[in-house]
Amino acid sequence: MSPVSESELFSPWVPGLLPLVIYAVMVLGLVAVLLFLAGWLGEKKIGLEKSRPYESGIVPTGPALLNYPVPFYLVAVFFLIFDVEAVYIFSWAAAFEPLGWYGWLEISLFITILIFGLVYIWRKGGLEWGPTATNTKHKTSC
């Protein structure tokens, strides 16, 4: 392997980077041209049917805003958090041998932090999705 000169070491261009930059410029240029042509050549009719939300050909009825209860969003956030956790754990398991004991220590720390988060959510009542006795008493007395 030949030694790298100082000019090559501090050069802003890595040898394989120029084709990538040219490709990115070409893609961005094509997208800009297509967006311009779509806006310039497209029809600009404004009417009731154009302003109506499209729901697979079904004419919308009733209010568009639905009030989802807060537990719905909590379940969604918990799902995202623990789904991402599973991705990290599976990727660690795939690279278990090269990571060795240091990797095991890191994933153990990661799982411990997530367990503390789960205990916190549990103690705050974030896992109570159904009606409880205290919620029922307050609803019937009002």
Image (cartoon, rainbow, N blue to C red):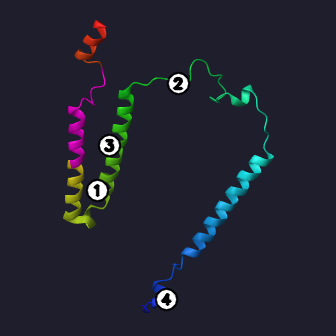
Classified by dominant secondary structure, the portion drawn in magenta counts as helix
Q: Residue at x 39, y 24 (%)?
A: 69
Which circle's residue, 1 or 2, is located before the other in the chain? 2
* Residue 62: % across, % down: 58, 17
- Disc 4 marks a residue whose amino acid type is Ser
Magenta span has 116? yes
Few, some or many residues within 10 Å of mark 4 (<14, 14–19, 20+): few
State which mark lies toward you, 2 or 3.
2
Which segment did they paint magenta? 113-130
Disc 1 marks which residue? Answer: 93
Disc 4 marks which residue? Answer: 7
Name the residue at the top extreme. Answer: 141
* Badge 2 vs badge 3, beta-carbon distance below 8 Å: no
State which mark lies toward you, 1 or 2.
2
How far apart, in angstroms, are the residues tagged by discs 4 and 3? 48 Å
- Disc 2 marks a residue whose amino acid type is Leu
Q: Residue at x 64, y 60 (%)?
A: 28
How far apart, in angstroms, are the residues tagged by discs 1 and 4? 42 Å
- Disc 1 marks a residue whose amino acid type is Ala
* Residue 124: % across, % down: 23, 31
Residue 137 is left or right of residue 44, and the answer is: left
